[in-house]
Image: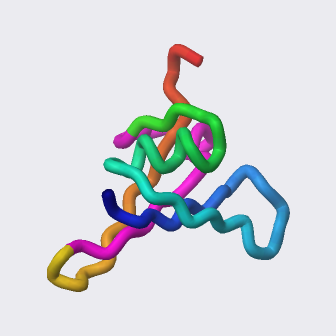
Amino acid sequence: MAQFRVIDLRSGLVEPEHLVNARSPEEAVLLALGEKGVRGGQNRSRLFCRVYWTDAEGQTNMVRLYRPLWE
């Protein structure tokens, strides 16, 4: 399992960051924030977090996760 850094964009905190061991960015968000997130949302008002991780080559990756339209 990889370590993910979840940045909570819902919060007004200065450091709304959670470190989580998970298999995917979506699982990391569910564990850290208790919400399901989906990739590829077009509506920025549904954006609620960013997730960062470092791959085996040392490259930092990031995905934005959005609240699903069905919730």
Give the residue drawn at x 45%, y 58%.
21
What is the x, y in percent for residue 35?
A: 60, 34
> Which residue: 15% across, 82% down?
57
State the scheme by which the image is colored.
rainbow
- Please state the horizontal and vertical placement of residue 22, each as a whole percent of the image: 40, 52
Residue 46 lies in what quarter of the image? top right
Q: Is residue 59 above or below residue 28?
A: below
User: In this rendering, is residue 18 above or below 33?
Assistant: below
Residue nearer the viewer, 11 or 53: 53
Taking the view exactly as shown, the residue that stands out farthest to the right is 12
**Which residue is drawn at the image coordinates 62% and 63% (left, top)?**
18
* Residue extending furthest toward the left: 57
> Which residue in the rendered view is the most extreme toward the bottom?
58
- The quadrant in which the N terminus is found is bottom left
Q: Is residue 18 left or right of residue 21?
A: right
Residue at 73% across / 50% down in the picture? 10
Q: Which stretch is magenta?
A: 39-55
Q: Is 40 a magenta residue? A: yes
Magenta stretch holds residue 45: yes
From the viewer's side, name the closer residue of 1 and 64: 1
Q: How many numbered circles are shown?
A: 0
* Quarter where residue 33 is shown: top right
Q: Position of residue 11 (x, y in %)?
A: 78, 56
Quadrant into which the C terminus falls: top right
Q: Compared with residue 24, is residue 62 higher up or lower down, i.e. above or below?
A: below
